[in-house]
Amino acid sequence: MPKCWTSLLPAKIFTKARKLSPKSVNPTGAAANLLSPGPSEESTMSKPALYMFAISHYCEKGRWTLDYTGIEHDIKYVAPGPHFRLVKKFKLPGSSVPYVVTDHEVVHGTGDIIDWADKHTSNGKTLTPAGEQGDQSREIEKRIDDVIGVHVRRAFYSEMLIEDPGRVKKMLTHNVSLAQKLIVNAIFPKLRKIMIKRMDIGSAQGLESIQILEKEIAWLDELLADGRPFLVGDTFSRADLSAAALLGRTIQPPQHPFYDHLYTPPKLKAVTSEWRSRPSLQWISKLYEQYR
């Protein structure tokens, strides 16, 4: 699976974030504990904690996985920059989200979260079919993660980060603590420049991503052309969930946990409005209705 965009950033971008302790950004001390580990990070944790960016479509995939398998969990919202402290704390291989933290382990990345959820399901539901169908679902999931997920992200940022950076900053800090918001405010000018460079963002790149997504939508349309309800087999699987979570962001389904805060920039919205009539996007809308 491709890493979250934060893993594309050089470690030095987080140096300022580490130096800006809650005390330094709030001299009154009111925010002194806002970055401290909460109860679900300690050894007494009663249920898993999902660390995530509120607006990330990859994080929506991880959250949907836990919800679908009935695993009770706490949501821990983090912002880029401040979250690096937790990356070091949990000794993660990269700075990407989401990750699940339990009393005994840290599960990093959406594919591994699905594997973990299959083993710990509390309602009997799983997302990986047995045998050959399981392999097929993983292959489709990988393509969706590596191509659709990446280019949905670039299509959005290529318009928003260039033309409406203030909105991006607001979305990146949605539901995080005051201390984290203050840190992001301090590092955002540098963060924005690096995001543009490392994710290869720009008008031409955004158009390229849209063209790639058109081809991927056509691929999904073809897979679904025989009227099948699922991409693999006769049950909802990791392939279906991946397609819905990563491509569904373009049509803003009302069942999405952050529906009220989702935003599609004007130029991209003109394109995604046309996508709504495509078979695969209509299918994704139904998946959200039935399984989210």
Image (cartoon, grey):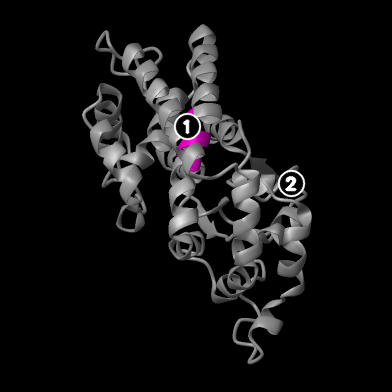
Q: Nearer the viewer, residue 119 or 88?
A: 88
- Quadrant location of the C terminus? top left
Q: Secondary structure at mark 1?
A: helix
First along the sequence among labels 2 and 1? 2
**Could you say where residue 120 lies in the image, as x and y percent from the top left?**
55, 35
Residue at x 32%, y 35% (from the top left corner): 291
* The image quarter in which residue 45 lies: bottom right
Looking at this view, name the residue that lies furthest to the bottom: 28
Disc 2 to disc 1: CB gap under 8 Å: no
Residue behind mark 2: 92
Q: Main secondary structure of the magenta part?
A: helix
Binning the other alpha carbons within 10 Å of mark 2 as few (below 14), some (14 to 19) or many (20 upward) gives some
Q: Which residues are magenta?
A: 148-154
| Mark 1 nearby-residue class (10 Å; few <14, some 14–19, many ≥20) | some
Residue ID for mark 1: 208
Amino acid type at mark 1: Glu
Horizontal side of 118 relative to 266 (left or right) equals right
Q: Is the N terminus in the top left, top right, bottom left or bottom right quadrant?
A: top right
The reply to whether residue 221 is in sight is yes
Q: Specify whether 280 is left or right of 16.
A: left
**Residue 164 locus on image (x, y percent):** 43, 60
